[in-house]
Amino acid sequence: MQNNKSLKLRKGFFISFEGGEGVGKSTQIDLLKNVLANKEFNVLTTREPGGTKEAEELRKLLVTGDKKAWDSCSETLIFNAIRREHINKIILPAIENGALVLCDRFIDSTIVYQGLVGEVSEKDLLELHQKYCYNLYPDITFFLDLSPEKGLNRALKRQNTVENRFENLGLNYHQKILDGFDSLQKRNPDRIIRINADNDKEFISNEISNHLNKLLNIND
Ligand code: TMP
């Protein structure tokens, strides 16, 4: 039996959460953060677009306003600029410091939103990631799988109704987003774990914790 208190990660661990709108990523990140902090892990939560002060400013431009404000090529360039700074200034230092990094969205969102559903080729996206974002991939990704009808319904009920540029793209668009994540998960079954998000939040949180316990060799 391993004693949790003596459990120090030799290096950190990078976990991303992915899925469509309103699938409950931020709720699950908060719940997991508490579980891990109770086990005395050093936990850092962050998000994309965002993470740095400047990226949070760019976030406002990306997620609010007219749905036609940016085409998917322009979005790709901005998301990559944000990601590069985020990796350099926040994610890599935390990993090197032994932290568990919980990130709300990362490269898979770009592959799906700007690539599989948008008009940028996956080859270009992977090349950009390699050239400018250190080809960094999460150690593990939780894909919260929920029908866009339910997700959008939840997302549009949120208090923060300004951040709705992507939500306003309609149900058809969001069905394509779900299909994109579905195919990405099928292509990367070792890294991307599908979680049925049509359950209550404690049940989902337990499932995520169980996966992580196995991966990190943590005993309850
Ligand atoms: P959020 O509402 O889940 O925080 O994400 C903001 C929006 O940004 C969401 O609709 C998806 C979109 N997005 C992309 O299109 N590409 C990306 O690379 C990222 C990180 C987010």
Image (cartoon, rainbow, N blue to C red):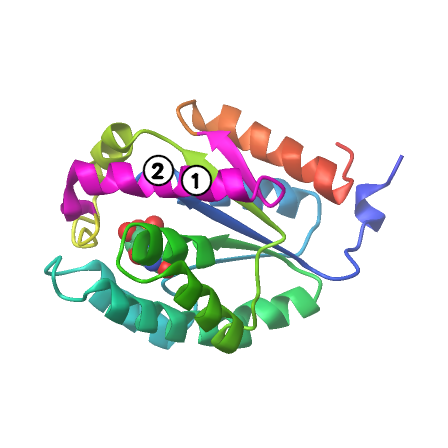
Q: Quadrant of residue 178?
A: top left
Please indicate whether residue 187 sits to the left or right of residue 19 in the image. right
Q: Is residue 56 above or below residue 15?
A: below
Please indicate whether residue 1 sits to the left or right of residue 190 in the image. right
Which secondary structure lies at badge 2?
helix
Residue for point 79% across, 60% down: 10
Closer to us: 172 or 19: 172
Q: Quadrant of residue 49?
A: bottom left
> What amino acid does circle 2 point to?
Asp
Where residue 181 appears, as percent x and y from the top left, is: 41, 42
Closer to us: 3 or 177: 177
Dot 1 crowding, Cα within 10 Å, few <14, some 14–19, many 20+: some
Residue placed under numbered mark 2 in the picture? 179
Q: Gap in Å between the C-alphas at discs 1 and 2? A: 6 Å
Residue placed under numbered mark 1 in the picture? 183
Where residue 212 appears, as percent x and y from the top left, is: 66, 39
The residue range painted magenta reads 167-196
Q: Main secondary structure of the magenta part?
A: helix
**Does residue 183 belong to the magenta stretch?**
yes
Residue placed farthest to the right in the image?
1
> What amino acid does circle 1 point to?
Ser
